[in-house]
Image (cartoon, rainbow, N blue to C red):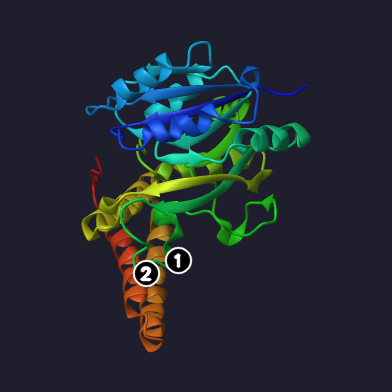
């Protein structure tokens, strides 16, 4: 029997992109009776909520709905999505993503053909909406813009592939419920890694799906140095919280040692890139690791 798919979009102040995201879901090849779209309004203060309502009014009878989550933070919104989802499968999409027309069909076909699979992460390509890709961008910083493009072969996540990014990731609902959902002490991007590791402990069959493609809109503000710094500070900060909760004092010290080593390696890469006349790429790799290490010592880092 073909499972039912619930698409969850957690949104906060994304009035520039949310309509494009919803429009891309309105033209999917998957029949309406096989999926639903749940937009979780995470206390938006801009025009996002009214734009979503207007879109829904123009889609009468279609499986689109919205709910409000007052607790601010991505993990709270994602947990609300679990509670609201009617499907056996939950696909999380970012509110600034635009889907290919066969995205939902590809996800659903995959889980139908692989009943042993716990989850899947689709391919994510950046779409620079206001400015070209900056000269300092490199493959080492793919996580910064949520680029997921490790090739055209479907395979289980392992090694340097990291884990599915929340811009385009799906899990069987039963596993999300079994582990108690997302960690509300990790309220921004660290919960992608948290949920992956928790589900993997139960069932390691979590796949990369190259055919399940979304484009991720990257505004110019996200390419500014202040945002770059804050995001990596937050990465380090949330990783300390996660490791402390799961592995205690020893785990924190081991993670700290790992980050110090990564800073050292990034310094070597900086020199390597400088030799081949791409010094700025090396510098930003080093800065990403330095800010992550610095954030590890912070009590809290506020992103929004």
Disc 1 vs disc 2: Cβ atoms closer than 8 Å? yes
The residue carrying pointer 1 sits among few (fewer than 14), some (14 to 19) or many (20 or more) residues within 10 Å by Cα, namely few
Query: Element under label 2?
Result: helix
Q: Return the residue at label 2.
A: 285
Closer to us: 172 or 20: 20
Give residue 136's position: percent from left, percent from top: 34, 69
Give residue 126's position: percent from left, percent from top: 45, 53
Closer to us: 138 or 238: 138
**Quarter holding residue 106:** top right
Q: Looking at the rendering, in which quadrant would you find the C terminus?
A: top left
Residue sitting at x 36%, y 23%: 52
Give residue 220's position: percent from left, percent from top: 28, 53
Residue sitting at x 25%, y 27%: 47
Is residue 193 toward the left or the right of residue 178 in the image? left
What numbered label is drawn on residue 265?
none
Is residue 221 toward the left or the right of residue 251 in the image? left
Q: Return the residue at label 1.
A: 140
Residue sitting at x 38%, y 88%: 275
Residue sitting at x 48%, y 47%: 215
Q: Where is 5 relative to 165, above or below?
A: above
Query: Element under label 1?
Result: helix
Q: CA distance from mark 1 to mark 2?
A: 7 Å
């Amino acid at each position: 029997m073909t499972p039912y798919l619930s698409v969850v979009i957690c949104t906060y102040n994304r009035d520039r992109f949310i309509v494009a995201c919803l429009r891309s879901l309105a033209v999917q090849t998957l029949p309406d009776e096989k999926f639903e779209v749940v937009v979780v309004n995470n206390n938006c203060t801009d025009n996002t909520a009214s734009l979503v309502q207007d879109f829904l009014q123009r889609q009468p009878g279609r499986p689109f709905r919205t709910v409000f989550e007052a607790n601010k933070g991505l993990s709270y919104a994602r947990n609300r999505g679990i509670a609201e989802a009617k499907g056996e499968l939950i696909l999380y999409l970012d509110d600034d993503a635009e889907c290919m027309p066969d995205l939902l069909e590809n996800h659903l076909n995959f889980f139908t053909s692989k009943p042993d699979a716990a989850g899947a992460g689709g391919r994510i390509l950046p779409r620079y909406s206001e400015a070209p890709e900056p000269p300092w961008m490199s493959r080492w910083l793919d996580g910064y813009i949520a680029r997921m493009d490790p090739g055209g072969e479907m395979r289980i996540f392992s090694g340097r592939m990291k884990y599915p990014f929340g811009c385009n990731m799906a899990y069987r609902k039963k596993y999300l419920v079994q582990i108690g959902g997302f960690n509300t002490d990790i309220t921004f991007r660290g919960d992608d890694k948290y949920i992956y590791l928790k589900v993997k402990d139960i069932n390691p069959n979590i796949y990369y799906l190259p055919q399940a493609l979304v484009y991720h809109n990257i505004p110019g503000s996200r390419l500014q140095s202040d945002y770059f710094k804050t995001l990596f500070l937050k990465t380090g900060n949330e990783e300390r919280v996660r490791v402390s909760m799961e592995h205690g004092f020893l785990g924190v010290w081991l993670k700290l040692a790992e980050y110090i080593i990564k800073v050292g390696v990034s310094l070597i890469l900086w020199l390597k890139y400088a030799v081949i006349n791409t010094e700025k790429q090396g510098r930003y790799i080093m800065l990403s690791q330095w800010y992550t290490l610095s954030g590890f010592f912070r009590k809290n880092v506020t992103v929004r």
